Structures are given as structure tokens and as C-alpha cells.
Image (cartoon, grey):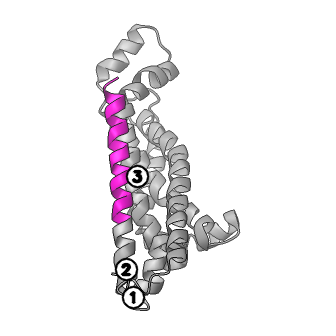
Amino acid sequence: MSAWLADLDWMDLGQAILDTLGMVAGSLVLSVMVGLPVGIALFLTAPGRLYARPSAHAALAFVVNVLRSAPFVILLILMIPLTRALVGTSLGVRGAIPPLVAGAAPFLARLVETALAEVDPGVIEAGRAMGATPRQIVTRFLLPEALPAILAGVTVTAVALVSYSAMAGVVGAGGLGDLAIRFGYQRFQTDVMVVTVVLLVILVQLLQAAGDRLVARVRHR
């Protein structure tokens, strides 16, 4: 086994793991901060909703759909000038976070919109019957009811970010994807490629298990 892993630099591997965790954690927090309010806005401004604004909804939905439809690798390259303007570099963990957020936030926004749309309309009617304002209906009725589905959406987004972070290695973002490309692919070091893939699979499994447990806990309250 040690001979088969002879090409593996454990220091590089450890740094790559930390870089991947940093990219996923940082971009997930920012994606939630952006995607959650955008998803709520998409739901509320749709025709027939509390704050129905068909033109605003159409414009917001168009932007979300454009970002969602762009392949992430293409988005990475297109955003290089903007990323440099925002964070000063397009390389490393810091340079990967803006495109990661741009790719994940619209994805999460649609999941949030779907979660809110699946709430029983009777919940809104109950809020209105109790004299709640539209804001109170959103914060005290809609969001608590949709919380398990929203958390499930955040879990799906976190798993997608692991995949996105690996693709970010194409432009030198660091992390396990960068390690796999530079050593596993370009230098034909199969052991490095296999180890990085295994570690990515383990990370996905841990994120999914943690998310499922959180959703189950919230759902049973």
C-alpha cells in the first residue's frame, strides 16, 4: 500500500482538504445569505402571492435562470475579471468563493421557492384570519412550516458545492479538485486521483448524513 501511495504528498493532501472545507463552508454561508432572500422574493412576488409583482418576479426569475443554466466551468472563467475586482485575485480559496456563490445561490433560491410553494395554503389563510401582517405571515407561518424543506435544500446545495469546488481546480482554486487535476490527471498519478475522489465521496456522505439528521430533528419538533 505504501508503495502504491508513493506519489502522494501528505502535506499537500492535508492542505487540499482544508482548502476544500474552506471553499465549501465559506461559499455555503454566503449562498444561504443570498439564496434564501432571493427564494423568498421569488415566491412572494409570483402572481397570486402576498406581494404579487409579475414584472419584478419575471426579471428576478430571468436572472436566476441565466445563472443556473450556465455550466459552472464556464461561469468560473467568465467571472475571473469580476472575481479579481471583488477579492483581488481569481486564484486560491478566496478567488473560488465568488463563482461558487454565483453558481450555488440561484440553485438554492429555486429550492427555497419550491419549499415555500409546497406549504399548505391553509397556513396563510390561518395567519390572515388571526390578523397577522404579511411580514408576520412570512416569518411566523410560512418559514417555520417550510423549514425542513429549506434545510434539505441547503444540504443539497452543500453537496453541489463539493462538486463545484472540485471543478474550481481547473482555474487554480486549490483544494482536492486542484490536486486531482495537477497531479492525478496532468502527471498521471493514479493514486493521487483515487485518494482525492475517495475523500470527496466521504465529504459528500458526511454532509448528507448531517443534513438528513438536522432535517429529521426539525421535522419532529
Marks 3 and 2, how far apart in space? 24 Å
Q: Which amino acid is tagged 2?
A: Met
Judging by the rendered image, the residue that carries numbered circle 2 is 193
Q: Which mark is residue 189?
A: 1
Q: Which amino acid is tagged 1?
A: Gln
The reply to whether discs 1 and 3 touch (Cβ–Cβ < 8 Å) is no
**In the rendering, at what x and y percent does residue 59 appear?**
48, 49
Q: Is residue 179 left or right of residue 203?
A: right
Magenta residues (range): 200-221
**Quarter placement of the C terminus:** top left
**Whether residue 110 is visible:** no
Q: Is residue 218 magenta?
A: yes
Marks 1 and 3, how far apart in space? 30 Å
Earlier-in-chain disc, 1 versus 3: 3
**In the rendering, at what x and y percent does residue 172 appear?**
55, 78
* Label 3 residue SS: helix
**Quarter placement of the N terminus:** bottom left
The reply to whether discs 1 and 2 touch (Cβ–Cβ < 8 Å) is yes
Marks 1, 3: nearer the viewer:
1
The reply to whether discs 3 and 2 touch (Cβ–Cβ < 8 Å) is no
In the displayed orientation, state which residue is furthest to the bottom.
187
Local packing at callout 3 (Cα closer than 10 Å; few below 14, some 14-19, many 20+) is many
Q: Which mark is residue 157?
A: 3
Viewer-proximal residue, 186 or 156?
Answer: 186
Q: Which amino acid is tagged 3?
A: Thr
The answer to which image quadrant residue 112 occupies is top left
* Label 2 residue SS: helix
Q: Determine the residue positioned at 35% across, 72% down.
A: 197
**Majority SS type along the magenta span:** helix
Viewer-proximal residue, 143 or 126?
Answer: 143
